Image (cartoon, rainbow, N blue to C red):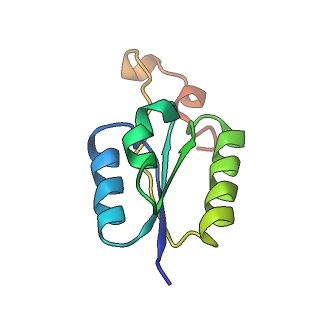
């Protein structure tokens, strides 16, 4: 049975390249991105599921995981490649905007 990986940020760059590499090596790939229309090329591969995921949207994270498990039976690995930007002077950025308000 093939292993399954969920990769965030697959619309371009490292995420897209990683999705192609894992798919080529026989892995099932849940290729996630904010705008799934950017993943048309990946969606054509038989062992790739393209799904919408925004790392700042909890519901989209839950949905991507559920769809991946539903299609492939489980998820064996995750590559968190997605990024998000906070634009300001570092010292002026409230901790809540950094995505880690527990510290």
Q: Is residue 32 left or right of residue 27?
A: right
Based on the displayed image, in which of its 4 quarters is residue 46 positioned?
bottom left
Q: Residue 77, image x and y in percent?
A: 48, 68
* Residue at image point 27% right, 50% down: 17
Total residue callouts: 0
Q: Is residue 12 left or right of residue 44?
A: left
Q: Is residue 77 visible?
A: yes
* Residue at image point 50% right, 30% down: 35
Relative height, residue 60 to residue 75 (above, below): above
Q: Is residue 74 left or right of residue 79?
A: right
- Outermost residue to the bottom: 1
* Residue at image point 31% right, 55% down: 20
Based on the displayed image, in which of its 4 quarters is residue 87 positioned?
top left
Q: Residue 10, image x and y in percent?
A: 40, 43
Q: Is residue 83 visible?
A: no
* Residue at image point 60% right, 29% down: 96
């Amino acid at each position: 049975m093939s292993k399954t990986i969920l990769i965030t940020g697959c619309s371009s760059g490292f995420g897209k390249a990683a999705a192609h590499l894992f798919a080529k090596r026989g892995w099932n790939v849940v290729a996630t991105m904010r705008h799934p229309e950017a993943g048309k090329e990946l969606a054509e591969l038989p062992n790739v599921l393209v799904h919408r995921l925004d790392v700042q949207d909890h519901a989209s994270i839950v949905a991507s995981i559920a769809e991946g498990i539903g299609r492939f039976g489980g998820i064996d690995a995750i590559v968190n490649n997605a990024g998000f930007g906070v634009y300001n002077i570092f010292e002026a950025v409230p901790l809540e905007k950094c995505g880690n308000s527990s510290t």
